[in-house]
Image (cartoon, helix red, strand yellow):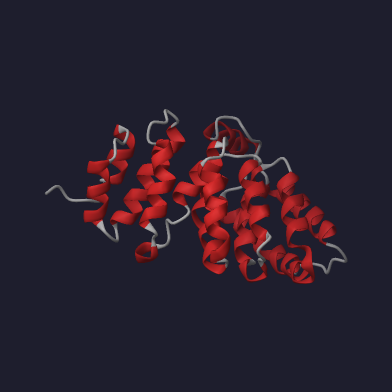
Amino acid sequence: MITSYTSFEDCLHALNLHFKKMGNATLAEGMAVYMKSQFVYFGIPAPVRKNIFAEYKPTLISFIKQGHLEAIILLMWEYDEREWQYCAVELLLACKKYWTTGTIELIERLILSKSWWDTVDHLGGKITGLFFNQFPRERQARIKSWIHHSNMWLNRSAIIHQLTYKEKTNVDLLLACITPHIHSKEFFHRKAIGWALRQYSRTDPEKVKDIVNSIPLSPLSKKEALRLIQPS
């Protein structure tokens, strides 16, 4: 049973001590290597991490109900260990009912900070999509900004933000996100383009084939886009 906390800072401090206690140096080293040594880890397997965090999440949500969403997420993001960022993404998603139109500024800030595919693909591919479903008027201007931004991770987020939209996918917007980056040599651009098209092929494979045949995609993007489509 988790003790009552008078502040979210105290709750996060207690969670940090719990994580440290459960850390495994050998696992931490392997996790860091897998992420190309960009981050340090406690070395806690995902199922264990989720179980630990589940004990503290209700308390943190109680503080979020009081208006502390951004403060809590940003404080979690400041911790060095990568497990903290995973928990922050999980908490942000769990608290979508408390999002406001201004939450997109927080999402963008997270995409731009400690950026790598493991956090960006959740923030850009799921959370951003859900946000624009809640606040559709915010989408056009924000996505246009992300498409042409100098930051690769915002580009990637724009490309993949409709992954969960299925038949509600705006194909014209998808093409607008893809087209400026079809000649990019960046792996994460090429992979994102293929991923977005592959996902939409589950809904409209013929349309995806038309797109692939009409745009000079990289071999990687094309291969990914057509992965689920049976040859004619």
Q: Position of residue 199 (x, y in %)?
A: 35, 54
- Look at 55% across and 43% down and name the residue there: 154
Q: Position of residue 86 (x, y in %)?
A: 61, 50
Q: Is residue 180 left or right of residue 45?
A: left
Q: What is the quadrant of the N terminus in the image?
A: bottom right
Q: Quadrant of residue 180?
A: top left
Using the image, determine if residue 44 lies above or below residue 10.
above
In this orientation, does residue 35 appear? yes
Using the image, determine if residue 137 lies above or below residue 231.
below
- Look at 56% across and 68% down and name the residue there: 134
Q: In the orientation shown, which residue stands out farthest toward the right?
A: 6
- Look at 42% across and 31% down and name the residue there: 184
Q: Position of residue 221 (x, y in %)?
A: 33, 38
Q: Is residue 108 left or right of residue 2?
A: left
Q: In the orientation shown, which residue stands out farthest toward the left?
A: 232
Of 49 and 59, the residue lying toward us: 59
In this orientation, does residue 42 appear? no
